[in-house]
Amino acid sequence: MSLAVQFSEYGDSDVLRVVDVEPPTAGPGQVRLAVRAAGVNPVDWKTMKGEMREQLSVRFPAGLGYDVAGVVDQVGPGVTGLKVGDEVLGMAPPSFGQFVVADPAALVAKPAALPWEMAGGLAGAGGAAWIGLELLAVAFREATTAGIQMHVGGSGPNLGRALRDLLPLIEQGRLRVPVSRTYPLREVAAALDDSSAGHVRGKIVLLPN
C-alpha cells in the first residue's frame, strides 16, 4: 500500500484525506515514479474548493497535484529513454502521493545537484513562466512584423522543452526557484491553507517520503 491525498467533496482543506491506496501501475507508454517532492500551486486549492469546476472535470474521490520530482521505479511497455532508477522532474497529476504514473513526455532528467524540493516545484513555477516568456517573444516578433497589433499563433512550446531550456540556467546559478516551505504529505491541508492565504514568497512543496 501507499499514501495518497484524496477529497470526496468540494470545500476547505478539511475535506482532504491522506489515505492508503494500491500503488498505481505503469501502463503502456507510462512510467511510475516514487515521488520525492510535489509542488503546491494555486490550481490545487482552487480545484479543492470547486473554483475550477468549469475548467476541470473532477470525479470523486479525486486527487490533487501537478508538479512532481521523483525516481522512476517502473517502466511500462513501449517506453524508451527512461529506466528504473532515473531521477526526473515534471508534471504528473495527481502528484500528491507516494507513487504516481506519468507520461515520459512531461518529464525531464533531474540534475544531480538540484535539491529535491526545488525540483518538485519547478514545473509549475519555472516551466509555465518560461513558456509564457517564449509566447511573449513570439507575440513581439509578430507585432514587429505586422504593426502594433499582437497575435500569438499555435500552441507554443511544450513543457518538456521549456524545462530542458530552464535547467542549464539553474545549474549555472543564473536562475533560482525559491522554496518558501516544505510540508510532509500528512500535512497537506496546512500546505494548501498556506498557499491559499497568499503572500507566499517562493514555492510550497510536499515531501511524501
Image (cartoon, rainbow, N blue to C red):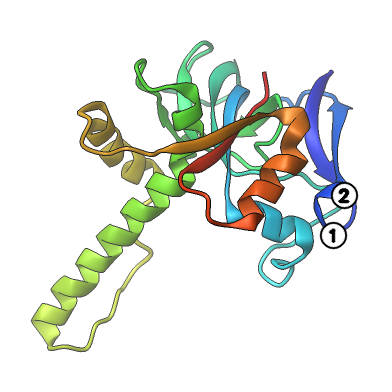
Q: Quadrant of residue 55?
A: bottom right
Circle 2: residue type: Val
Quadrant where the N terminus lies?
top right
Q: CA distance from mark 1 to mark 2?
A: 7 Å
| Residue 176 appears left or right of 197 | left
Q: Nearer the viewer, residue 45 or 194?
A: 194
Quadrant where the C terminus lies?
top right
Can see residue 28?
A: no
Query: Disc number at residue 39?
Result: none
Mark 1 surroundings: few (<14), some (14-19) or many (≥20) residues within 10 A: some
Query: Disc number at residue 15?
Result: 2
Image location of residue 170, percent across then percent down: 28, 32
Q: Nearer the viewer, residue 43 or 194?
A: 194
Disc 1 + disc 2, Cβ < 8 Å: yes
* Mark before the other along the chain sequence, 1 or 2: 1
Q: Residue at x 75, y 33 (%)?
A: 187
Judge whether 163 appears above or below 168 on screen. below
Q: Quadrant of residue 163?
A: top left
Image location of residue 152, percent across then percent down: 30, 74
Image location of residue 146, percent across then percent down: 13, 86
Q: Nearer the viewer, residue 164 or 79?
A: 164
Query: Disc number at residue 10?
Result: 1
Judge whether 27 appears above or below 1 on screen. below
